[in-house]
Image (tube, rainbow, N blue to C red):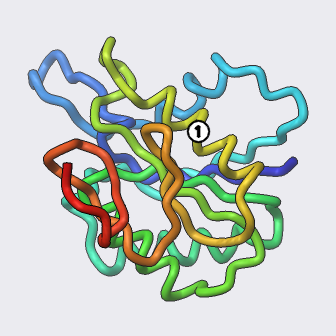
């Protein structure tokens, strides 16, 4: 299976800068994450689209992400997009609008805590996204926290710190 993983930054890739005393999006942590997984029949192509906190993303950035998804379509069996969780829903809706009937699964994921943190959900979410990429029918989804939700109509639930369908009651 050929999976293109597009990285955009976000919490999942934040690293600690000791000199500045701050978390920053400097590089993708995807290669570290993938190195810890057994994926014997998966070919992964990594495309770094940008390294930004999703709160700093503009419409131009989202257009670049949509273009990267479209470009990866012909060379992939599935696409996984690592994205910051704060505006992941906005980007998911943009991808769904631009590709209402994709020919393959497009799975968005991220993390509530950076990969470098001991209690990070990053590894779990990447594993779930890769499994969803293999199992889901064509469409645009978010895969996080043991759930796969299809766009449109997905939002971040800031109270429970996960994603939910817009029609689901808050927990």
Q: Mark 1 points at which residue?
A: 128
- In terms of depth relative to the viewer, which is nearer, 152 or 56? 152
Q: Is residue 27 visible?
A: yes
Judge by depth and name the residue closer to the eye, 111 or 17.
111
State left or right for residue 110 relative to residue 58: right
Task: Say if 54 sits above or below 137 in the image.
Answer: above
Say if 98 sits above or below 108 in the image: below
Q: Which residue lies furthest to the top in this view?
A: 118
Residue 106 lies left or right of residue 39; in this view the side is left
Using a 10 Å C-alpha cutoff, classify the residue at mark 1 as few (fewer than 14 neighbours), some (14 to 19) or many (20 or more): many
In the displayed structure, would residue 81 be above or below residue 44?
Answer: below
Q: Is 28 positioned to the left or the right of 107 in the image?
A: left
Task: Give the image quarter of residue 120.
Answer: top left
Q: How many marks?
A: 1
Compare residues 160 and 19 and report the one nearer the observer: 160
Q: Position of residue 42 (x, y in %)?
A: 83, 38
Residue 71 in picture, x, y percent from top left: 69, 73
Quarter of the rendering containing residue 136 = bottom right
Residue 31 locus on image (x, y percent):
60, 29
Which type of secondary structure does the marked residue at label 1 adopt? Answer: helix
**At 48% across and 72% down in the image, what residue appears?**
151
Q: Residue at x 39, y 25 (%)?
A: 115
**Measured from the top left, where is residue 58 in percent x and y?**
26, 73
């Amino acid at each position: 299976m050929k999976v293109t993983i597009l990285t955009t930054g976000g919490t999942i890739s934040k690293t600690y800068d000791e000199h500045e005393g701050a978390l920053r999006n400097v590089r993708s942590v995807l290669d570290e994450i993938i190195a810890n997984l057994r994926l014997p029949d998966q070919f992964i192509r990594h495309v770094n689209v940008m390294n930004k906190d999703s709160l700093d993303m503009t419409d131009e950035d989202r257009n670049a992400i949509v273009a990267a998804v479209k470009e990866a379509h012909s060379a992939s069996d599935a696409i996984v997009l690592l994205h910051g969780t704060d505006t992941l829903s906005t980007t998911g809706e943009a991808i769904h609008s631009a590709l209402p009937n994709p020919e393959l699964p497009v799975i968005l994921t991220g993390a509530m805590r950076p990969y470098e943190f001991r209690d990070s959900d990053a590894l779990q979410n990447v594993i779930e996204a890769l499994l969803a990429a293999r199992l889901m029918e064509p469409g645009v989804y978010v895969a996080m926290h043991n759930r796969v939700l299809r766009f449109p109509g997905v939002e971040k639930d800031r109270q429970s710190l996960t994603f939910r369908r817009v029609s689901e009651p808050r927990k």
